[in-house]
Image (cartoon, grey):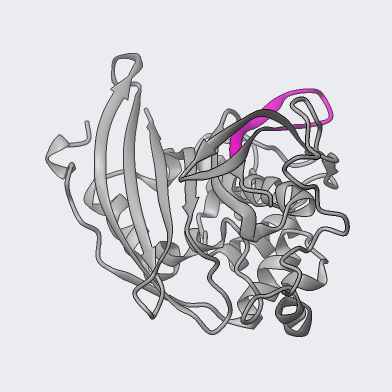
Amino acid sequence: MIDKKWIGHELPVSVIQIERSRLRFFAKATGDTRALYTDPATAREAGFSDLPAPPTFLFAAELDSGANDQLLAALNIPITKLLHGEQGFTYHRTACAGDTVTVRSIISDIYEKKNGALEFVVKTSRAHNQHDELVAELRSVLVCRH
Amino acid sequence: MPSLTNAINPPSFDSVQIGDQLPALQLPPVNRAMLALFAGASGDHNPMHIDIDAARRAGFADVFAQGMLGMAWIARLITDWAPQSTLRRFDVRFLGITHLGNAMCCAGRVVEKLEYGGEPCLRIELHSANQFGQTKIVGEALVALP
């Protein structure tokens, strides 16, 4: 059982530098060959300051920082039992290469289904850029299967 | 005014009809190299996706795809059709594990015109399924086309 005392828990702050090379790697890994996501000149022509981070990219922030691993350890969720149940993004502006994005998350809910065979952890996050402008809000539902 | 689009012929809000389908995005079959690349690019180093020995010890027959890889593919479907700068929300539920060899097809359909955050938006139902018709991800997006 995941202790419900963790509801309201704030994760350590995660800071991700958005870099061209990482965005190109992400484009390659997702099979994306569009110039907008790999060529800065094309991105600027399209009105962005540099390569845009694609819609799901910011999920990397808490993986890179280790905040996600720390959370799983604290909640005693083995990685072998972890599944991703839901993921949501609300967008306010596009983060681009050269931006520094800070992600702050809180555990907003913990619940179970099927008499505890499945436990759910809801994490909500806010991502701001270096100008303290809200870039995106994220909502993740992690599932621990027993 | 620079073009904010990456789509060749981005639709306009008025030109879009309820029921319109987004051009489907067909992906190649999932292989181990894809999963390794996405692990590196996304920051998700969970061994269930890249280490068959670890996956077997955890009771899986083999490694399986990261959920966020499937979501990133659906993001490509959306931004192939509408500029990323018009994307307001993007929410998915992961319904099943995407296995090696699964060739995912991402599809979307306009289901509603509504007002969100003070601007007219389109609600798009999203879905990805493998070649056997098994749905792996469902979701929706809100897009504020000009």
Does residue A4 appear left or right of residue A134 in this picture?
left
Please give left or right for residue B118 compared with residue A23 in the image: left
Above or below, A14 against A30 in this view is: below
Q: Position of residue B83 (x, y in %)?
A: 71, 57
Q: Nearer the viewer, residue A115 or B3?
A: B3
Check if residue B78 falls in the magenta segment.
Answer: no
Rendered location of residue B29, percent (x, y): 83, 44
- Please give left or right for residue A127 compared with residue B34 in the image: left
Residue A116 visible (yes or no): yes
> Which residue is nearer to you in this view: B125 or A71?
B125
Image coordinates of residue B28 in percent, x first then y, are 85, 47
| Nearest the eye: B60 or A139 | A139
Rendered image quadrant of residue A13 = bottom left
In this rendering, the count of numbered labels is 0
Q: Main secondary structure of the magenta part?
A: strand
| Residue B92 in sight in this render | no
Task: Confirm whether the magenta stretch covers residue B133.
Answer: yes
Query: How far across and how far down the image is residue A85, in percent?
Result: 47, 35
In magenta, the rendered stretch is B126-141
Location of residue A74 with respect to A130 vertically, above or below = above
Q: Where, by quadrant of the figure, is residue A32 drawn?
A: bottom right
Looking at this view, is B116 or B72 the one in front? B116
At x 68% / y 64%, what residue is drawn?
A: B37
